[in-house]
Image (cartoon, rainbow, N blue to C red):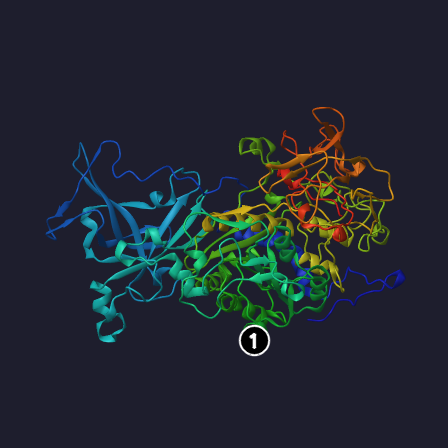
């Protein structure tokens, strides 16, 4: 396709970020509205905050009122007894949604008290070949099928139970429910061509997956393929989750595979990665530790971002607290933005195929994100584009990326146009690529406005979990379009507005990408209410969106904020608006990855220990004077109050030493008088007097009347009413020659406030 325009130079030599370089960008402007109407015909994309998770109410009941449970039942025509736990094949398949159920594992047999009618209840299974290509079509491989009502409080497995009549039972079959990888535990005769029909009719059935379809209306709104867990498998066909993890990725590090370690000096000091890329069978010692595992708060889960673009997902990942190990993209402008933002991350500037086949590139991360190009899945995309064939190949490269990186969890972002019936074969093949490697996967259309994005942006989001890992749910919404309903649903916030999103821009500062005077309209447009979300989705073109005054276009910086980027994210190169429009909104990614981090912590059964370290880095070099009696005083250019008594605290906050004259020498237990110089103006501290009221004490607490500089007076510094003590428990590590000026800015970690500290 031909370019529409080239980058235009602005006064001062700056490049114009408002450049459309491909007709695909123009098409995208209308995609959201058109695809929504067509996809809404087959799936439920209504706004709703009811989530289908954590609704367990205990085990299923075998019988209902007016029924009695039977330990067994004799089928006279077939002359055999049926008992709970047995599996039967049906004469006429039952329908669950669009799937034909041929087998039922019996969970209970009941008889009505007045009619003596017998009902057989159990879970329905269909052959894997009936799953529309989303599971490998192997002989006698089966899948449990469940249709779940999100408003039903019962767990999905209880909702999945169906009723059948005894007259519809054809014969008894053997079914093995296992979490072992294919082809373990299947019928050995299945591969013998001459016996395939006999195996199909009478051989052993094996189930490794459950398919769950969630409904709030008649149309589905969420889907999941959930691999059988260790505790769900039949007793004799159960494999340890640890064995599955070892066999797939060589083990895992509880609490995250980024483990900072201070060992030695110079180049030997820094982060250490703990995973085994060579031995795929041995048990990892961290996986066999009994009970809860205590890890440092500095240990992090690792992540990789493929098809990274300008770093939307990468920004959300790093802001969520994960260690971003690598990014991959080969668009020069996006790579420039990645390099401007993520200095501690390995950035692979290469084609995805080259990345996959390069055996010298080896990464093992805990979570992998994939955002393959999505223009080809739009119903508005009715004619071939120059990159269509390449984009199709890239979509299926997701499977190869999973095989190469082998993450514990993965996430995928795609346009929900791929759910359109026209493209269902591509979606099914994408899911099949994940299940072939033993991953569980769930997917749904997510409205990002329910997670704090000030625009009606919807995308298909997928979450996957590797062999031996439990599949996490989607994070619950944080915002709601209905304020009254928000209050009923746990105090959700109202939708974020455009004005709120742009409030981060300081009108007194100059921003390279915020020059409103360059975006005026020749003829003013109709103003709109800025105290509402954007009326249209931000795309590469986004011509329908403009400033609520009606006088100008949004600036690139404003578009970035409206797309969920923080103000400190940098954009480099040209086509900035295209970089922004293509990005995965970081505000949602941050919430998603915080949710996944919490999920992994729960699965790993880890407890994170806070590490309390006093601030010791000065803003500038200060002088140190020594008194005649070897007393040390910290000085600065500003006149500050000094305190000649200190309280030494241990790691757990207990008092180690409190004295007015704490002398100090080479012994950690010795004392030395010291004057601690605090910046009261920055710290806003109140002083507590000693018992004898003769001198001030360096035991301090945060002022409840004042707020730290830069924070709102109405915002509390700490949620704790108890004093927050300043810790000097590491001062014994110093010697006179090592003393430097210590400037305490805000000591908030001891109260668990987790507020951003001012720069030191």
Identity of the residue drawn at 44% across and 69% down = 279
Picture quadrant where residue 345 is located: bottom right
> Among all residues in the image, which is located at the extreme front?
629
Whole-percent x, y for residue 324 in the image: 61, 59
Q: Which of 295 and 23 is in front in this view?
A: 295
The answer to whether residue 590 is left or right of residue 107 is: right
Circle 1 is placed at which residue position? 358
Identity of the residue drawn at 63% across and 53% down = 316
The answer to whether residue 249 is left or right of residue 67 is: right
Whole-percent x, y for residue 528 in the image: 74, 41
> Among all residues in the image, which is located at the extreme right?
12
Whole-percent x, y for residue 63 in the image: 25, 37
Residue 135 visible in the current orientation? yes
Q: In which quarter of the image is the N terminus?
A: bottom right
- Residue 586 versus residue 62 in the image, above or below: below
Describe the element under mark 1 as helix, strand or loop: loop
- Residue 199 versus residue 232 in the image, above or below: below
- Residue 47 versus residue 433 in the image, above or below: above
């Amino acid at each position: 396709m031909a370019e529409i325009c080239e980058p235009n130079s602005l006064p001062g030599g700056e490049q114009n970020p408002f450049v459309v370089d491909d007709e695909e960008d123009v098409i995208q402007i209308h995609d959201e509205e058109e695809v929504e109407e067509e996809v809404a015909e087959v799936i439920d994309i209504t706004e709703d905050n009811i989530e289908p998770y954590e609704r367990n109410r205990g085990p299923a009941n075998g019988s209902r009122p007016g029924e009695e449970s039977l330990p067994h039942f004799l089928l006279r025509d077939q002359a055999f007894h049926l008992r709970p736990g047995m599996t039967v094949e049906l004469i006429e398949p039952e329908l669950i949604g669009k799937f034909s159920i041929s087998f039922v594992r019996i969970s209970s047999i009941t008889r009505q008290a007045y009619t003596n009618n017998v009902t057989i209840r159990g879970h329905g299974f269909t052959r894997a070949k009936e799953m529309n290509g989303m599971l490998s079509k192997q002989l006698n491989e089966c899948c449990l099928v469940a249709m779940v009502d999100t408003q039903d409080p019962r767990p999905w497995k209880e909702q999945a139970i169906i009723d059948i009549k005894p007259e519809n039972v054809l014969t008894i079959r053997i079914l093995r429910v296992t979490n072992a990888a294919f082809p373990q535990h299947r019928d050995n005769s299945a591969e013998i061509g001459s016996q395939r029909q006999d195996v199909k009719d009478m051989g052993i059935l094996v189930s490794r997956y459950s398919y769950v379809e969630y409904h709030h209306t008649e149309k589905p709104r969420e889907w999941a393929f959930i691999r059988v867990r260790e505790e769900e498998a039949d007793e004799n066909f159960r494999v340890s989750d640890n064995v599955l993890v070892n066999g797939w990725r060589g083990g895992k590090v509880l609490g995250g595979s980024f483990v900072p370690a201070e060992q030695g000096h110079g180049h030997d000091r820094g982060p250490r990665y703990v995973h085994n890329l060579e031995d795929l069978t041995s048990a990892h010692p961290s996986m066999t530790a009994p009970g809860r595992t205590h890890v440092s708060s500095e240990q992090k889960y690792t992540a990789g971002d493929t098809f990274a673009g300008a770093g939307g997902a990468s920004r959300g990942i790093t802001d969520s607290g994960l260690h971003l190990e690598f990014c991959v993209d080969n668009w020069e402008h996006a790579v420039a933005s990645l390099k401007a933002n993520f200095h501690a991350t390995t950035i692979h500037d290469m084609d995805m195929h080259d990345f996959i086949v390069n055996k010298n590139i080896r990464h093992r991360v805990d979570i992998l994100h994939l955002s393959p190009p999505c223009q080809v899945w739009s119903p508005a995309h009715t004619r071939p584009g120059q990159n269509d064939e390449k984009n199709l190949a890239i979509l299926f490269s997701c499977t190869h990326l999973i095989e190469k990186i082998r993450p514990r969890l993965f996430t995928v972002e795609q346009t929900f146009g791929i759910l359109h019936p026209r493209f269902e074969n591509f979606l099914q093949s994408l899911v099949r690529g994940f299940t072939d490697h033993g991953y569980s996967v769930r997917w749904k259309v997510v409205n990002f406005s329910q997670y704090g994005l000030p625009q009606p942006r919807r995308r298909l989001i997928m979450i996957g979990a590797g062999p031996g890992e439990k599949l996490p749910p989607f994070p619950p919404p944080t915002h709601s379009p209905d304020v009254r309903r928000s209050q009923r649903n746990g105090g959700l916030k109202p939708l974020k507005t455009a004005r709120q999103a742009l409030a981060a821009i300081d009108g007194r500062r100059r921003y390279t990408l915020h020059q409103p005077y360059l975006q005026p309209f020749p003829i003013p447009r109709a103003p709109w209410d800025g105290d509402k979300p954007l009326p249209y989705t931000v795309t590469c073109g986004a011509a329908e969106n403009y400033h609520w005054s009606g006088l100008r276009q949004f600036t690139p910086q404003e578009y970035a904020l409206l797309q969920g980027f923080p103000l400190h994210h940098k954009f480099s190169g040209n086509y900035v608006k295209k970089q922004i429009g293509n990005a995965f909104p970081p505000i949602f990614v941050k919430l998603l990855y915080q949710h996944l981090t919490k999920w992994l912590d729960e699965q790993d059964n880890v407890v994170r220990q806070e590490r309390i370290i006093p601030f010791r880095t000065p803003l500038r070099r200060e002088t140190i004077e020594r008194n005649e009696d070897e007393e040390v005083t910290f000085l600065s250019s500003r006149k500050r109050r000094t305190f000649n008594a200190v309280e030494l605290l241990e790691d757990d906050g207990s008092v180690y030493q409190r004295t007015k004259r704490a002398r100090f020498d080479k012994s950690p237990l010795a004392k030395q008088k010291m004057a601690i110089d605090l910046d009261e103006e920055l710290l806003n501290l109140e002083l507590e007097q000693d018992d004898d009221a003769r001198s001030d004490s360096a035991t301090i607490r945060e002022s409840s009347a004042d707020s730290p500089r830069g924070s709102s007076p109405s915002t509390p510094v700490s949620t704790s009413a108890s004093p927050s003590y300043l810790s000097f428990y590491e001062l014994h590590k110093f010697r006179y020659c090592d003393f430097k000026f210590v400037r305490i800015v805000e000591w908030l970690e001891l109260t668990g406030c987790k507020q951003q500290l001012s720069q030191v």
